[in-house]
Amino acid sequence: MKNGHSYVPISKIYIDSHIADYQETIAIQSRLNVPASTIHNIREVLDLVLHSEDPIQKGKEILFITRNKGNFIKKCPGTRHYTCCGYRILHIGTFCTMDCTYCILQSYFHPPVLQYFVNHRELLTELDQIFTQKKVYRIGTGEFTDSLIWELWTNLSNLLVPKFAEQYHCVLELKTKTTNIESLKPLHHNHKTIVAWSLNTPQIIDEEEHQTMSLAARLNAAAQCESWGYPLAFHFDPIIIYDGCEEDYRQVIEQVFSHVSPENIVWISLGTFRFMPDLKSIIQRRFPNSKIIYGEFISGLDGKMRYFKPLRINLYRKIVSWIKEIAPNVLVYFCMEDDEVWQKSLGFLPSERGGLSRMLDESAVRHCGLNLES
Amino acid sequence: MHFKLKILPLTGIDCSNDIYRITTRTCIDDLVDSIKNVGLINPPLLRKDKAGYIIVSGFRRLAACSCLEWSTIEARIIVPEKTELDYVKYAITDNALQRPLNLIEQSRALKMLSSFFSDDEGLVEVSNILGLPGNPTIIKKTESICHLPWPIQQGILSNMISFSMALELGKFARETGISLAKLFCDYKLSLNKQMEVITLIKEISAREQISPQEIMQSDHFQDIMNDSDLDRVQKAEKIKFYLNQRRFPEITKAKQKLHKNLKNLKLGSGIKLISPKNFEDTTYTLQLSFKDFDELKDRRTKLDNIIKNPNLKTIMN
């Protein structure tokens, strides 16, 4: 569905007995208003999902409210062969209620289950610890899930946005394909929360990004957030090569800048479609009409399937030129690409500018008012 | 099982009735020789039918006796009359006790049995007792084999098509499955190459949204198949190349270009330039081999010439 709020409907909630009496748990139950069961062993949920006909679909239909027993803040799992941006993941939950064909989470978790962690006291403690380091950290919630799907049933943004607003070293990036932004409006953000959208061409959104919002809706939401003073970011990831894709991506770029001002964009990332080989059979089974896995892929240095490098460079060059034509000062970077791609597509290497992490940190400092001295 | 031995005229036996035929063997020369020399040791097993007798087991023996122009034959007649399931069990057992059943025979046996069971449990039990596969999934897959077009089954019998490949071929439209089976058997493709061809055809089909049959009927494909100047190995290679080129046009172009430039470098013996795998990495490898000091000096001279060759720059860019 491309209009209005959309997601795979949740049919049942499972509650970890350890957090059954948490206020957040009770609040989610009352907002979702679907049957709920308290369980003592996570195995019950995992088995239910694993033994269903389509575990990936089932994993989207139930919500497991639990606690995060590990670290809330994790390093982004980059690989040494390609340049990583040094991101930190804020691990608030897993999986997603939308259903993108290419979603790596389908093969990343075994099995994938929609989980939400409610032990927020530990989460806030970890944030306090990282804030006291007085180092710039870019922290995002949109790696293992979509950042804003949770807005429908939780007070997550209400917890995180003001928390980041009260310090000057770290930025929070909320990355989404939804338009669930209403709850952000009244929040005191102090420019420390970047609201980011994953963008694609209307054709890809229509054919491959099931249950997500249309491009126009995403851009309208971005404009709304800009009007509320939030810094913005955009991620063209995954860029998918198909007949006519160049013109389509050019038009998307034009539309971005007809909705928001380049000055308020902290960064734009570009990344072509890549996937672990396991995902191919999942896509073939779940989305038999999808053609995206039949591009010209090779096995990359990290074992992931990637488009043949000259094809990546060719499209990157064009997309970069279209962005730079309109917004020459916006920071454009590549997600997980090597020096050759950087040099041939952007004309420089990250190392010439202090490294990718530093480039992004500096942009965050400029746009979000980070103050390293305080 | 009870039976009585009876001498019957061959004309009284309906040899065309195949309902209990398990065997896939059609050649009877060995059996004709044997029966001619030592006689019929093991009489065929028959059952009474409205019109006469039909064969439960011993199709080849009867064919051999017929070939020897016998007018009568000693046969074992099952008495008293049994259920259809019993006859099927006798047919399977009599064949399975003589030799291990091949895949098609197992499939035929399971097809016969499965018509008597509405649930997996009963079928699995009987299948196990008769020495056939005992796993319900394997039973289903095996049973499906005898429903495949005959050229695919022939490929299995000639060991050119594996069980898993036969199942893959069964997923294609009938004509496509037959065309692929013939291609694999005629060109004697290994299992890996068969898998490669099938994957390429499936992916081209998905990518271009045309049927696999259309790909195989394309002019280029047919030209290769019908080229009388090519032997089977050359045809197989050309078909693979054509499919790869169609599935991965840019990668194939790059490989061809690299090949051409490497040729123009005139590396000669003892020097090998290895480009990065999949053109993804940026590291090239140069291998020098030499037997003595003079050869090493010779390689160095050649290497100097290679470095000056503009084709090297083209390759590396």
Image (spheres, coloured by chain):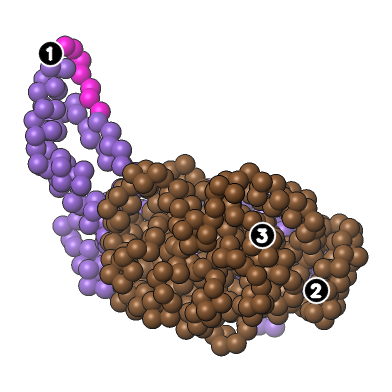
Chain colours: A brown, B purple
Q: Secondary structure at mark 2?
A: helix
Quarter residue B94 falls in: bottom right
**Residue A189 percent location from the top left of the image:** 62, 67
User: Which chain's residue wears label 1?
Assistant: B
Q: Secondary structure at mark 1?
A: helix
Q: Is residue A340 left or right of residue B267?
A: right
User: Which chain's residue wears label 2?
Assistant: A
Residue in the foreground of this view, choosing between B45 and A292: A292
Residue extending farthest bottom: A3
Label 3: few (<14), some (14–19) or many (≥20) C-alpha neighbours in 10 Å:
few
On screen, residue A18 above or below B308: below
Disc 2 marks which residue? A28
- Under mark 1, the amino acid is Asp
- Residue B299 visible to the viewer: yes
Nearer-N-terminus badge (3/2): 2
Distance between the Cα atoms at labels 3 and 2? 26 Å
Q: Nearer the viewer, mark 3 or mark 1?
A: 3
On the same chain, marks 3 and 1? The answer is no
Membership of A343 in magenta stretch: no
Residue at the location (31% across, 72% down)?
A326
- Under mark 3, the amino acid is Glu
Quarter residue B225 falls in: bottom left
Residue B294's disc is 1
Residue extending farthest front: A374
**Residue A236 percent location from the top left of the image:** 43, 67
Magenta span: B287-294
Disc 3 marks which residue? A166
Image quarter where the N terminus of chain A lies is bottom right
- Under mark 2, the amino acid is Ile
**Residue B311 percent location from the top left of the image:** 12, 43
Membership of B292 in magenta stretch: yes
